[in-house]
Image (cartoon, rainbow, N blue to C red):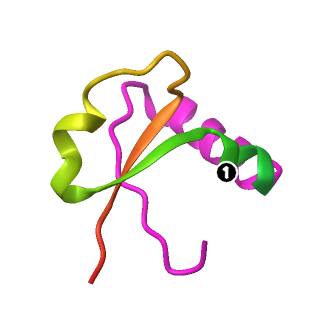
């Protein structure tokens, strides 16, 4: 997704973070896109914190 920005938190050391970044950069884009279970608008942020059985990653979308 050109022009997209992803912000998150990582609980790891810098070496593991770098390894993960390299693995994600080399991963199949279709597979990565399937990791996002739900996309919600910012005003639905409360819903994002209610887990669903098939959740992997939930994304809050900010639009201009």
Which residue is drawn at the image coordinates 48% and 71% (left, top)? 4
Quarter that holds the C terminus: bottom left
**Picture coordinates of residue 33 (x, y %)?**
67, 51
Quarter that holds the N terminus: bottom right
Picture layout, residue 39 above or below residue 55: below
Figure quadrant of residue 58 = top left
Figure quadrant of residue 11 = top left
Residue topped by disc 1: 33
List the single residue furthest toward the bottom.
64
Magenta stretch containing residue 43, yes or no?
no
Which residue is drawn at the image coordinates 83% and 50% (left, top)? 28
List the single residue furthest toward the top.
53
**Picture coordinates of residue 54 (x, y %)?**
55, 22
Which residue is drawn at the image coordinates 77% and 56% (left, top)? 29
Picture layout, residue 3 above or below residue 58: below
Which residue is drawn at the image coordinates 73% and 42% (left, top)? 23
* Residue 33 relative to residue 48: left or right: right
* Residue 16 relative to residue 22: left or right: left
**Picture coordinates of residue 25 (x, y %)?**
71, 54
Picture layout, residue 23 above or below residue 29: above
* Residue 22 relative to residue 63: left or right: right
Magenta-drawn segment: 1-28
């Amino acid at each position: 997704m050109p022009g997209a920005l992803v912000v998150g938190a990582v609980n790891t050391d810098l070496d593991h973070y770098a390894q993960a970044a390299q693995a994600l950069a080399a991963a199949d884009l279709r597979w990565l896109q399937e990791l996002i279970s739900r996309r919600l608008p910012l005003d639905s942020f409360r819903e994002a914190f209610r887990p669903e059985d098939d959740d992997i990653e939930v994304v809050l979308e900010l639009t201009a």
